[in-house]
Image (tube, rainbow, N blue to C red):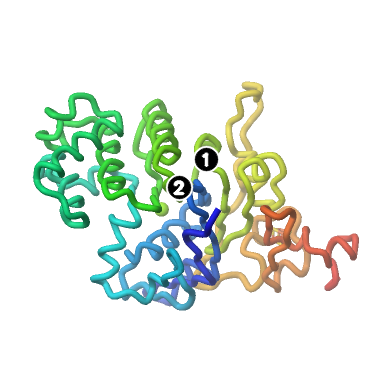
Amino acid sequence: GRTLLDVKNLSVSFDVYGGEVQAVRDVSLRIKEGEAVAIVGESGSGKSVTAQTIMRLIQTPPGRIKQGQVLLDGQDLLTLSEKDMQKVRGNKIGMIFQDPMTSLNPTMTVGKQIMEGLLQHQKLSGEEAKKRVIELLRTVGIPNPETRLKQYPHQFSGGMRQRVVIAIALACNPSLLIADEPTTALDVTIQAQILSLMKDLQQKMKTSIILITHDLGIVADICDRVIVMYAGQVVETGTKREIFNNPQHPYTKGLLKSLPRLDQAKDEPLIPIFGTPPDLIKPPEGCGFCSRCDEAMRICETVVPEFTEISGTQAVRCWLQHPYAKRAGSAGGKEA
Ligand code: SF4
Ligand code: MG
């Protein structure tokens, strides 16, 4: 497919008391038309900041976009005026955040809120807009839309509210939907329903999706491709199958081991990844995962690993997979 979003060498920092947090460090990623991609990582890995930068929702200052491009259909969003960016948000890029209560206005009926975006971005009469609202509510699985559109957010359950948020995000038929932990606030059954709804809609509407999550477990159902982030960097990327069946980065392997599996014996403990992520005010000189990695070599402490391609679709930022290490045939590689 055609490339829809092309993020190139993005670096974003935040000025804080005592220094500069290098939240996103030279991140590049591509999303194709109609593709569903997950960005996975722990909190503080830079995944949300990456998404917020794509949507230009980073407050500057304290935030600072230090380098990079965010090309949507070839146009660099980072160079747009705020006014032009507002046309992109909601219209070309739809957004879903973790807590539906914060993205909905408690004093406005649900129907009005969906209609607002429609009228802002598309030339529709009031009657046409209302028709479209009813249709949207039905599409996201809200029963009795004619009645429901007159109600306020507090009259909806958490899961139903998130359906409303999805309806708002999809109202203008965006080419890209960015969902940041869209189901984290919901209980497990509702989570599954919302995810399968998103998958259905994505297939029906051919929307591309970026799903941001700390939970690799929810990725499998809806995503084609996975991007793993750690300490502000992309450390591995691959198809869902590659990431689940043939992970290469020690961090990705750790994430998988810490997932509950269906075939797992009840007394078999889950293995969490030991340690904590590095302080991004002073990011490690070498590999960001070094302090937590069982397989770290000397070179890992001093040189940031380059990407090594494992296949046409999988790449990993780890010295273990680098041709140098392979050639040397022993830990320490060229530097040892
Ligand atoms: Fe571990 Fe070195 Fe690979 Fe980093 S580069 S993940 S420290 S082996
Ligand atoms: Mg986040």
Q: Amino acid at mark 2?
A: Leu
Marks 1 & 2, CB-CB < 8 Å contact:
yes
Q: Relative to 328, is 150 on the left or the right? A: left
Comparing 32 with 261, the one in front is 32
> What residue would you read off at disc 1?
219
Comparing 292 with 140, the one in front is 140
Considering every residue shown, the one lying at the far top of the view is: 266
- Residue 324: give x, y in percent of width and height: 83, 67
Disc 1 packing (10 Å; few <14; some 14–19; many ≥20): many
- Residue 325: give x, y in percent of width and height: 83, 64
Q: Residue at x 30, y 42 (%)?
A: 166
Q: Amino acid at mark 1?
A: Val
Q: Is mark 1 within 8 Å of ligand 2?
A: no
Task: Tell me how far mark 1 sits from mark 2, CA to CA.
Answer: 8 Å
> What residue would you read off at disc 2?
211
Specify the quadrant that holds the C terminus.
Answer: bottom right
Q: Residue at x 56, y 63 (%)?
A: 233
Tell me if residue 288 comes above or below residue 145 in the rendering. below
Comparing 164 with 60, the one in front is 164
Whichever of labels 1 and 2 marks the residue nearer the N terminus, that label is 2
Name the quadrant containing residue 322.
Answer: bottom right
Name the quadrant containing residue 242.
Answer: top right
Disc 2 packing (10 Å; few <14; some 14–19; many ≥20): many
Q: Secondary structure at mark 1?
A: helix
- Residue 122: give x, y in percent of width and height: 21, 54
Q: Quadrant of ligand 1?
A: bottom right
Name the quadrant containing residue 82.
Answer: bottom left
Q: Secondary structure at mark 2?
A: strand
